[in-house]
Image: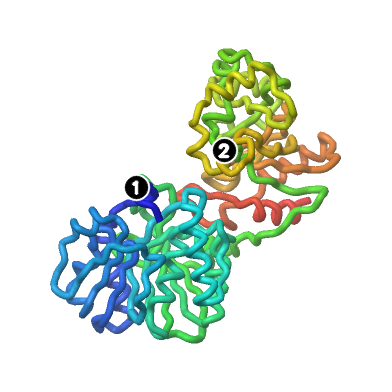
Amino acid sequence: MKIEHLSRCQVSTPPEIVDLLWRLALERRQGKAFSRVLDLGAGDARFARARNAYESYTGVELDKKKAQAASLPAGAKVQVADAMTWKEAGFDLCIGNPPYIRHHNLDREWRAKALESFSKQAGVNMKSTANAFVLFLLQALLKTTDDGLVVQLVPFEWVTRPSAKELRAYIDQMGWRVSVYRFNAKIFPSVLTTASISIIDKSAKMGGWEFGEIGRDGTIKALEHASGSSSAVLPYEKGTSALYSRRGLSPGGQDIFVLTEQERLHFSLQKRRDVVPCVTTLRHIPVETKELDGDVFQDLYVAAGKRCWLIRSDKENVSPELKTYLDHVGERWKKYSTCTVRSTWWRYRPHPKPTLLFSSAFVGKTSKVLINSAGAIAVGTVYGIIAANAKSTTAGTLAKRLRQYDFQQRVVSHSNNLKKVEVKQLNAVLAEIS
């Protein structure tokens, strides 16, 4: 992993949370101190400060400055190294707070080597969409003893996300016991995710998962399902050719590909020829609004100064005006990996105009759904629902049923009260209500 990637994820663990992880770890071993402790992505080695809880502590940290700043008690050391290439194993506890880096921000070569290593060591073929902390979780399991313990502060999302499916399957195959406690308080104000303490006990061979909600004081409330309700989390399903949802287009930097009306006029870009309508958010749309027609698009997007004009990439020859704009971008596109892997950086694969627009993130019982009469392209966190040959009445009925659906009871908390529906989960709902 490159040092510059670490700057995106270095968030220090609050001291009381460090103490809480240690308390839960010791409880799993009846208060007995651990012989050998490993901390992958140790930072300033603050987990080493629980001196009475272990005989020896080894922290692994790639950031040399962080490692050198560590204040270490007797029996503790920090090695400057990459956690994914760490060879030493046989630890009876791996504890810590691994880096939270989304998969698209990971160095491709680093990730490829890590995935290859996991495949060779454990026969686990992780997805390339696995986030960094998921890889650290698997590494922790591989570096602990057969009866070892893994206690990590990680995003709660790993218990259901498809990107961690292979890790969950591996844990189940090995018969290890998993306890995941999501925090009911915001532990990291600057991070948009729900933190959890995830405990994997390799000494338990009968398997099983348990979920709970935990406070800063360590009080735990048992949960029946990962959803936090009496209902199971929505399954992940494929759509049909007649009805399916699609993730919003990710062209490679909305600041480049999606323009405001002022920017469109400045570069003399023409509607339809150079740009098409799009929506990147439904957050500001009033709840009583049920349809995105031309007037609503004009008032709430164009006139409101929202980014709502998507540059076209499906034409063989672009207009002189659009070429001028693309030249004006300069080298800004190089910071987006989506652009750098294309033969022509701006030529993305277009998405169809969806029948309905659906906000993947929501607060409360359900999300916002709009009939897409304006023919806008869904971008980013806005999903498109494609209903082939759907009449306006059919689209209206489908939208109404989606608004009435209680998503809150069926999805995992993303960040405090914010919840998020995945594309394949939305497909499952569409199959249920259609």
Q: Tell whether label 2 touches label 1 (CB within 8 Å).
A: no
Q: Residue at x 50, y 37 (%)?
A: 334
Residue 81: horizontal and vertical position, in percent? 32, 63
Instruction: Judge whether residue 140 can be spotted in this image.
Output: yes
Residue 76: horizontal and vertical position, in percent? 19, 71
255 left or right of 367?
Answer: left
- Secondary structure at badge 2 equals loop
Q: Which residue is mark 1?
A: 7
Q: Which residue is mark 2?
A: 252
The colour mode here is: rainbow
Residue 79: horizontal and vertical position, in percent? 26, 66
When asked about the image quadrant of residue 89, the answer is bottom left
Residue 336: horizontal and vertical position, in percent? 51, 40
231 left or right of 398?
Answer: left
Q: Earlier in the sequence, mark 1 or mark 2?
A: 1
Q: Residue at x 32, y 59 (%)?
A: 62
Seen in the picture, residue 334 relative to 84 is either above or below; the reply is above
